[in-house]
Image (cartoon, helix red, strand yellow):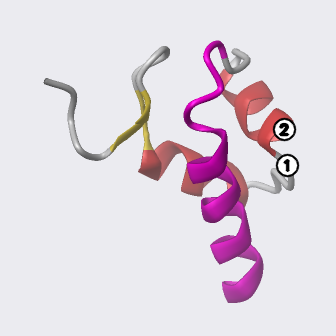
Amino acid sequence: MSNQRTMCTCHNIARERFQSACEQGAQSVKSCFKQMGCMPKCSDCIPMVRAVLAQAKKTS
């Protein structure tokens, strides 16, 4: 069973890492993954990453 905080199961990336990428200036799904040195594989996490991006824009 995967960790509930894990958003990207292909790369085992937690929500906090995506939030941190947004805080460091990532403004798209691609730039979030690029900061982590990878790209999405199965794309299941893309809607969740977009939600993190939208939340980051609201709080900035």
Q: Is residue 45 visible?
A: yes
Residue at coordinates 30% horizontally, 46% vertically from top-left? Answer: 5
Residue at coordinates 40% horizontally, 22% vertically from top-left? Answer: 12
Q: Which mark is residue 4?
A: none
Mark 2 Cα-neighbour bin, 10 Å: few <14, some 14–19, many ≥20 = some
Q: Which mark is residue 28?
A: 1
Q: Amino acid at mark 1?
A: Ser
Q: What residue is shown with label 2?
A: 31
Magenta span: predominant SS is helix
Residue at coordinates 72% horizontally, 30% vertically from top-left? Answer: 33
Residue 35 in picture, x, y percent from top left: 74, 31
Q: Is residue 38 above or below residue 49?
A: above
Q: Is residue 48 above or below residue 51?
A: above
Of the 4 image quadrants, the one containing the C terminus is bottom right
| Quadrant of the image occupied by residue 30 | top right
49 in magenta: yes
Q: Amino acid at mark 2?
A: Ser
Q: Nearer the viewer, residue 17 or 43?
A: 43
44 in magenta: yes
In the image, which residues are magenta? 41-60
Secondary structure, mark 2, is helix
Q: CA distance from mark 1 to mark 2?
A: 5 Å
Residue 53 in picture, x, y percent from top left: 71, 62
Secondary structure, mark 1, is loop
